[in-house]
């Protein structure tokens, strides 16, 4: 059933590696189907499944577009049918607004938009109608209650059945507020209901308004009072996808306002947090360095820079990050830059894709063979270090 | 994203062997560092290969190490240590930032870290150098070989006859090993001489002296009295004082500013050659070394005898003896080099059979006469040179006769400026005699100066071809017009020379435009980072000394004939007609300018997110527009260079080239959002103009913008002239003022003269008057004198009479009567003299006094008259 797309002009070792990556995917995917479905995620060491972000067979939704990229149309079609029958959002589950959006809404939307390309029969009116789109819309509507705050910034968690729980903490991480525009704007454009894009924009604007005098945003904010609770500013955990969505939203919507917001942030970030092509954590009001660490989540940044054409800086930062990979065979969650070693209790590598994504963007921009080396290294080390019988485990 | 917790863990898997059991490499995959140390005792040379089993680089290097090991296993012990296994000693003791790490030990000396390319030949070469860090130089010829290498060489002289090991030898040996630690900064070769006679060649007399050879500068002898004779010091000294004629560049693939730092130093000549470090001889490298040596050889030949340069050059044709003279004369009499605006013009041949032609150096000489002070003279303007050429053409015929072997100069005025004139210095040269060098600066450049074509073909009057008919005079491109010897010091575009191994870094060559199809991986390019250009040596020419020399020369001359190389994306294929055509550097002209269609061109780049999201609009647009009159195309400007005028600094950029007016391309306005209706409106608006009317407001506007440049230049010219005029006016006014001043002065003088004359006259009058009074007085005096004379006479008479009387008195004492008579007579006499009434009955002495008195008065009078 697997149909490999034709790639003329590729050398044999390249094709061989491609097969290896494909095998790695199926190793994980098949074990998920076998041992964990219909739970959200596979636990590779115990060979069972668990619900982590809700109960929507999350891995399956996440893997939809990968199936298409690998050219496995039949499996894609099968999964679409399974999801239509099996996934129900009318459940009494407390779900992360952020994760549900990026994984469920995002996954369903991309699958919906790709479905015609995949050879699926689409109904009349596609792309403005379709079962996957309806599912995405349903999921997104379950998230809307979270946005009912005085500031327009959403709560972090919402009950899919009852809305925001009474007594829910109003503290949300910055990324949890600013990571909606891509999915929600797409949804609004496809369904014609502007409410999604409106709430996403309102949340973005609220963040923009609450940035510090030196132009930085912190890590966590109270969505009722708009007070910053965690005042560490940086590009990594808690903030990362906010910046990412500003750029990608600007590109998707050809929106100058979003872009100018990002460029302002970019200026402040370069000014206060950049040292020798590393990006550190600083106090958002004073700009003083609070943590001289590199977080594995920050590795998306070079890719983002390359999207706006700052390829030189992107490459330099990427090579910094790559040295960390070369040291450990993966990126530790926290890496202390002055000490040149991992931070205690933060040595783990949960197989995050950020650095590899950046390498992909940069390779498209530069075709630098060093970037292919990272690809090779990633395959080698993930297989050597984290592969277990039932999949791939966090190390 | 926000993180989460996890619970279950599993210990890491046990390590397995990394090398196969049959491999000559000892694989300590459990990281037994202590055992590795033990093994070191067994062998003189040991290579440690520290790896991590997951590391891609280690995996790639494994094969290379095995290859080296299989060749050297009888002399070197190869030990691989897994430095990742967390229970192993290695992981606990060593702290590596990358893998693999290669350490070498020469007996107890080490570790020497190998930092070169992970390729078997390079590793093997390095291991061999660790095995024999010193080269034994036995003979004179070997010494010459050793010293003529492009890499710096250090020679130590040690006499082995006295003791088993002369003092200092071990230190020298260790310093050679030390230098290997720094080898990645540039190789320094160490050699040892034991023969006294060989040592004398490099003036080493005492055993234990160390010599650093240098080509361009003077060689050095290690200053033992200043620095301690230690291995580190020798190594440091050699590193600091070495000269690098050519440098190998080996970017290591990680974050490095190597290329950037080197290219920032100035224009760089990058030479890509396939290099096998194990080979004994490298003929191509030797040739390149020779070129580099020539290029850098400045101080010796130039300082001593500049004229000898070409005579000494075996390649240049024989010169007659007049040449050096002419040259000296030239540089003395015509300091043309002072003026920046010069251009060399080669006049066409007098007769086609003649082997001579005239070469002229045309210079714009600005304001050598009166210099208007306010005028800013731009350094050198192309338009000025053009104007100079224009007026030169008009006078062309005057330069056609065979002039002479020496230089003759003539000046002619510029069209409109009285202040600047052109100088043309011409001489007739034989055809194969174009080498012409002044000691300071190359005055006559290559004859192949690229003129902008004027299309002037007014050669009817004379049956000689026009200068710009280039086909009638095609100079032999291989004629060496400048000499490479010491060129690096004579040009202000000095090149740094670099070598790259094309086996490892061919990708750089490809990026610079080397063709991918060639199997001969030789390539040379000059990269000028500051000018943002690079030039490429034609790959059809083989990379040998002379072509390289020519390449360097062509770069160095003032008007370089090299063309900026435009890199083209070779990966673009045209399998079938695409909806949106992909344009490359090579197809740009054809697709955009030669096609009889309207062309809409999108500038994009792979990285450009904002460009990618326009793709669907362009595809739609291409489907909408009739394909027989519209082309929708795009160009990836990061992979395809275009001439500067077609480049953009902003992505995405959309340009529209309307049919039949391709030169009037229009840019899609930046502030409009790019969508189908806007694009269509834009296209229709600009394409419809063509048929109905040739030019509308907008196009006129464009036209005017185009003219702006020219106008502004002319305006500047006018301004210059104006200020010249005003300067003249000022000078005129000044002159006028001075003139009137002078006139006034004259008048004043005249007046003065008049008054003086008047004064003179009055004075004359006065003097006349005085003269008259003087005369009168004189007269009076004379009269007076006469009267006095008379008086004196009378008084004399009287005295006589008196005497007579006295006699009478005496004689006739008593006769009273007669006495009275005499008295009466005397009284009558007194009234006669006007002057003195008081002159009474005076006696004779009284009378005499009186006369004296009158005399003094007279003298006073005359002196007073004189003073007046």
Image (spheres, rainbow, N blue to C red):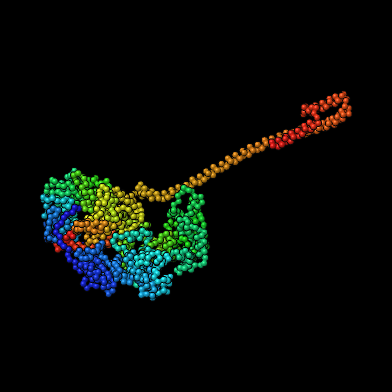
Q: Residue at x 46, y 59 (%)?
A: B344
Above or below B553: residue A251: above
Above or below A173: residue B759: above
Tally the numbered discs.
0
**Residue B563 appears in which quarter of the rendering?**
bottom left
Q: Residue at x 88, y 25 (%)?
A: B815
Q: Is residue A5 visible?
A: yes
Depth check, front residue: B318 or B802: B802
Depth check, front residue: A127 or B123: B123
Q: Is residue A309 visible?
A: no
Residue A108 rendering spot, x and y as whole percentages: 16, 54
Residue B185 rendering spot, x and y as whole percentages: 34, 64
Depth check, front residue: A373 or B740: A373
Q: Residue at x 57, y 42 (%)?
A: B742
Q: Residue at x 24, y 50 (%)?
A: A233
Above or below B301: residue A145: above
B222 vs B864, left or right, is left
Residue B606 rendering spot, x and y as whole percentages: 27, 57
Residue A157 rendering spot, x and y as whole percentages: 15, 49
B543 vs A133, left or right, is right
Quarter of the figure that contains the C terminus of chain B: top right
């Amino acid at each position: 059933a697997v149909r490999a797309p034709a790639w003329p002009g590729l050398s044999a070792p390249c094709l061989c590696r491609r097969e290896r990556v494909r095998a790695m995917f199926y190793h994980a995917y098949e074990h998920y189907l076998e041992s964990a479905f219909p739970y959200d995620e596979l636990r590779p060491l115990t060979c069972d499944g668990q619900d982590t972000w809700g109960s929507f067979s999350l891995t399956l939704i996440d893997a939809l577009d990968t199936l298409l990229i690998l050219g496995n149309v039949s499996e894609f079609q099968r999964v679409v049918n399974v999801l239509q029958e099996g996934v129900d959002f009318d459940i009494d589950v407390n779900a992360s607004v952020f994760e549900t959006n990026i994984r469920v809404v995002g996954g369903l939307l991309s699958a919906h938009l790709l479905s015609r390309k995949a050879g699926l029969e689409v109904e009349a009116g596609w792309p403005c109608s379709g079962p996957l789109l309806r599912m995405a819309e349903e999921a997104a509507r379950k998230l809307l209650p979270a946005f009912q705050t005085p500031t327009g910034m959403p709560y972090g968690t919402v009950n899919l059945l009852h809305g925001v729980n009474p007594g829910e903490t109003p503290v949300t991480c910055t990324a949890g507020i600013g990571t909606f525009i891509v999915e929600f704007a797409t949804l609004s454009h496809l369904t014609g209901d502007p409410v999604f894009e409106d709430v996403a924009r309102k949340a973005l604007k609220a963040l923009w308004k609450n940035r510090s005098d030196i132009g930085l945003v912190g890590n966590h904010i109270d969505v009722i009072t708009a007070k910053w609770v965690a005042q560490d500013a940086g590009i990594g955990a808690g903030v990362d996808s906010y910046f990412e969505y500003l750029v990608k939203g600007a590109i998707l919507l050809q929106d100058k306002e979003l872009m100018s917001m990002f460029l302002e942030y970019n200026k402040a970030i370069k000014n206060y947090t950049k040292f020798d092509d590393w990006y550190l954590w600083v106090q958002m009001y004073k700009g003083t360095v609070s943590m001289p660490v590199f977080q594995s989540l920050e590795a998306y940044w070079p890719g983002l820079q390359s999207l706006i054409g700052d390829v030189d800086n992107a490459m330099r930062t990427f090579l910094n990050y790559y040295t960390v990979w070369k040291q450990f065979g993966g990126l530790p969650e926290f890496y202390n830059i002055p000490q040149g070693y991992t931070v205690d209790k933060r040595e783990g590598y949960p197989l995050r894709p950020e650095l590899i994504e950046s390498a992909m963007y940069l390779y498209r921009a530069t075709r630098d063979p060093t970037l292919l080396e990272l690809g090779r290294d990633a395959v080698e080390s993930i297989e050597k270090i984290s592969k277990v019988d039932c999949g791939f485990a966090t190390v | 994203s926000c993180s989460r917790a996890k619970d279950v863990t599993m210990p890491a898997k046990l390590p397995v062997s990394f090398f196969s059991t049959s491999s000559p490499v000892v694989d300590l995959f459990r990281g037994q560092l202590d055992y590795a140390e033990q093994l070191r005792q067994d062998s003189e040379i040991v290579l440690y290969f520290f790896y991590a089993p997951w590391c891609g680089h280690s995996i790639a290097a494994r094969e290379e190490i095995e290859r080296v090991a299989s060749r050297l296993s009888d002399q070197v012990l190869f030990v691989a240590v897994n430095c990742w296994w967390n229970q192993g000693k290695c992981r606990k003791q060593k702290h590596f930032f990358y893998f693999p790490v290669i350490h070498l030990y020469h007996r107890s000396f080490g570790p020497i870290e190998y930092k070169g390319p992970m390729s078997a030949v390079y590793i093997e070469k390095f291991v061999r150098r660790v095995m024999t860090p010193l080269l034994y130089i036995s003979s004179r010829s070997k010494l010459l070989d050793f010293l003529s290498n492009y890499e710096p060489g250090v020679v130590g002289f040690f006499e082995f006859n006295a003791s088993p090991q002369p003092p200092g030898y071990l230190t020298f040996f260790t310093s050679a090993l030390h230098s290997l630690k720094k080898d990645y900064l540039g190789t320094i070769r160490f050699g040892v001489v034991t023969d006294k006679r060989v040592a004398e060649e490099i003036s080493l007399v005492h055993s234990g002296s160390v010599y650093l050879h240098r080509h361009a500068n003077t060689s050095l002898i290690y200053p033992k009295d200043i620095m301690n004779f230690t291995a580190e010091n020798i190594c440091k000294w050699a590193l600091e004082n070495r000269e690098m004629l050519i440098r190998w560049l080996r970017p290591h693939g990680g974050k490095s500013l190597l290329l950037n730092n080197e290219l920032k130093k100035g224009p760089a000549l990058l030479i890509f050659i396939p290099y096998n470090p194990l080979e004994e001889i490298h003929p191509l490298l030797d040739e390149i070394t020779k070129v580099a040596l020539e290029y850098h050889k400045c101080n010796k030949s130039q300082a001593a005898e500049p004229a000898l340069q070409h005579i000494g050059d075996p390649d240049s044709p024989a010169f007659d003896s007049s040449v050096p003279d002419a040259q000296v004369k030239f540089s003395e009499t015509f300091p043309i080099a002072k003026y920046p605006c010069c251009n060399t013009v080669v006049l066409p041949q007098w007769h086609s059979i003649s082997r001579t032609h005239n070469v002229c150096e045309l210079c714009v000489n600005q304001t050598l006469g009166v210099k208007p002070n306010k005028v800013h003279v731009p350094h050198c303007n192309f338009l000025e040179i053009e104007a100079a050429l224009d007026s030169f053409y008009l006078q062309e015929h005057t330069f056609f006769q065979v002039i002479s072997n020496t230089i003759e100069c003539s000046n002619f005025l510029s069209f409109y400026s009285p202040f600047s004139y052109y100088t043309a210095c011409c001489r007739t040269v034989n055809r194969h005699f174009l080498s012409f060098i002044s000691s300071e600066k190359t005055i006559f450049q290559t004859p192949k100066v690229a003129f902008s074509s004027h299309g002037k073909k007014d050669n009817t009057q004379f049956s000689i071809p026009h200068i710009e008919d280039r086909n009638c005079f095609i100079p032999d491109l291989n004629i060496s017009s400048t000499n490479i010897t010491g060129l690096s010091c004579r040009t202000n575009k000095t090149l740094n020379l670099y070598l790259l191994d094309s086996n490892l870094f061919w990708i750089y060559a490809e990026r610079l435009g080397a063709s991918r199809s060639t199997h001969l991986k030789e390539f040379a390019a000059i990269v000028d980072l500051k000018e943002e250009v690079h030039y490429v040596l034609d790959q059809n020419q083989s990379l040998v000394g002379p072509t390289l020399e020519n390449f360097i020369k062509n770069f160095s001359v003032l008007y370089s004939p090299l063309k900026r190389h435009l890199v083209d994306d070779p990966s673009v294929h045209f399998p079938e007609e695409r909806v949106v055509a992909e344009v490359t550097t090579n197809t740009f002209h054809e697709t955009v300018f030669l096609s009889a269609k309207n062309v809409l061109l999108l500038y994009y780049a792979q990285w450009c997110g904002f460009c990618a999201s326009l793709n669907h609009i362009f595809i739609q647009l291409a489907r909408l527009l009739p394909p027989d009159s519209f082309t929708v195309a795009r160009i990836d400007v990061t992979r395809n260079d275009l001439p500067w005028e077609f480049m953009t600094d902003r992505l995405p950029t959309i340009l529209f080239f309307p049919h039949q007016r391709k030169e009037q391309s229009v840019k899609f306005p930046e502030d409009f959002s790019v969508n189908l209706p806007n694009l269509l409106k834009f296209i229709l608006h600009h394409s419809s103009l063509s048929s109905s009317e040739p030019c509308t407001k907008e196009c006129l506007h464009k036209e005017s913008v185009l003219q702006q440049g020219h106008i502004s230049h002319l305006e500047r010219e006018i301004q210059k002239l104006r200020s010249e005029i005003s300067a003249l006016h000022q000078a005129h006014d000044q002159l006028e003022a001075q003139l009137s001043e002078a006139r006034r002065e004259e008048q004043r003088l005249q007046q003065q003269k008049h008054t003086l004359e008047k004064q003179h006259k009055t004075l004359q009058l006065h003097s006349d008057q005085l003269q008259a009074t003087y005369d009168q007085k004189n007269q009076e005096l004379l009269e007076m004198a006469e009267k006095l004379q008379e008086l004196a006479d009378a008084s004399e008479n009287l005295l006589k009479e008196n005497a007579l009387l006295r006699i009478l008195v005496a004689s006739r004492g008593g006769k009273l009567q007669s006495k009275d008579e005499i008295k009466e007579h005397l009284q009558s006499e007194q009234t006669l003299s006007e002057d003195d009434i008081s002159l009474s009955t005076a006696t004779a002495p009284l009378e005499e006094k009186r006369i004296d008195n009158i005399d003094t008065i007279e003298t006073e009078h005359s002196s007073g008259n004189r003073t007046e």
